[in-house]
Amino acid sequence: MHQAHTNKPSKFDDDINFLKLADVLWQEKWIISSVTTFVSIILIIYSLFMPNIYESKALLARVDSSNVISGALSSYSALAGIAGIRLPSGGENGNSAKAIEKVSSLSFFENNILTNIYLPDLMAVKSWDFKTNNLAYDKTIYDSKSSTWVRTYSYPQQQIPSAQESFEVFQERHFKLNEDVQSGFITLSIKHQSPFVAKQWVELVVDELNNFYRQKDKLESHKAISYLNQQISMTNFSEIKEALAQLVQEETKKLTLIEANQYYVFEYIEPPAVMEKKAGPQRLLIGILGTLLGSMLSIVIILLRKYFFKKA
């Protein structure tokens, strides 16, 4: 009775194939060396032409003045109900929760950030001179001498970058926001060729968020006081007038709290700084990546020469 033979390769065959492959690569080591060196040098040279990027960070804590204020007014909700008025309540989602979403919106960028920065610093920077603290702009995009945009563009782009295009660049290349779920602390960071601009933009974002919600609550409070005074003049019931007067008093206190808090939504745990060390590019990492890519490319070239082209 004959024993059936299988074509399943054994571990010994695998070892032989691996040794053959290693022998082929050793014989063509000059290709590996040449290609790896060439790719590494190209990537290193490319990295040397890349501008240094600096990252300024701020560690923020929630203030949520809105919750404090709504808590102060909660005891007067019954009085407001008698007068037929509904007081706003901050609930669990205060201004800081809204601000985290608001800061990444196009409307906030267009109305609060874009109007307070120099657009070429966002869309046309080429490099930063640390000796003079001056920014150089890409002459194919922006002519700094005549202060005109000269870039080539196609629809939907415009000669002067639009708010939407600028917003995409800001979000993708410069801005980052991370929230620690456990501590609730928020890290807001900006990357830029100039460490001074990076710091200024972090401060701008924090200030504009605080100002946005301060003005929003201030306007709502003024409207509430105006409405309450109007209701006082229209009613003849002394109990309701007294209740409305108490509400006006509390809204006035609310206005005082709004004006008194410098950091209305977020306060600094660690303010941003002008960083001395760059955040990128990581030229050593680029060099290592070039070595790996060059090695892989050279192996592919050797295998194609040895097995594919020879059979063809």
Image (cartoon, grey):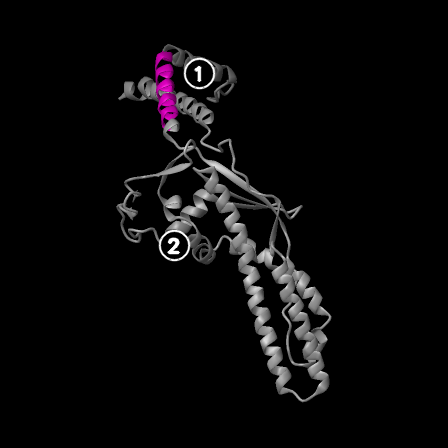
| Residue 30 on the magenta span | yes
Please indicate, yes or no, whether residue 132 appears anywhere in the rendered image.
Answer: yes
Name the disc covering residue 17, or none.
Answer: 1
The residue pinned by badge 2 equals 163
> For residue 281, which quarter of the picture?
top left
Left or right side of 38 for 85: right
Residue 50 appears left or right of 278: left
Majority secondary structure of magenta residues: helix
C-alpha gap between disc 1 and disc 2: 60 Å
Q: Quadrant of residue 120?
A: top left
Q: Nearer the viewer, residue 73 or 93?
A: 73
Q: Mark 1 against mark 2, which lies toward the viewer?
A: 2
Let me know if residue 93 appears in the view: no
Q: Earlier in the sequence, mark 1 or mark 2?
A: 1
Which one is nearer the viewer's eye here, 295 or 270? 270
**Residue 217 vs residue 291, the one in the foreground:** 217
Residue drawn at x 67%, y 46% is 183
Residue at image coords 51%, 53%? 103
Q: How many marks?
A: 2
Classify mark 2: residues with Cα within 10 Å, few (<14), some (14-19) or many (20+): some
- What's under tag 1, amino acid-wise? Asn
* Stretch of the chain drawn in magenta: 28-46
> Magenta stretch: residue 67 in it?
no
The residue closer to the viewer here, 282 or 63, is 63
- Image position, residue 278 (x, y; %): 48, 32
| Residue 23: % across, % down | 41, 11
Q: Residue furthest front?
A: 132
Relative side of 304 to 116, left or right: left
The correct choice, above or below, for 202 with respect to 20 in the image is: below
Residue 41 lies left or right of residue 182; in this view the side is left
Q: Residue at x 64, y 72 (%)?
A: 87
Q: Secondary structure at mark 2?
A: helix
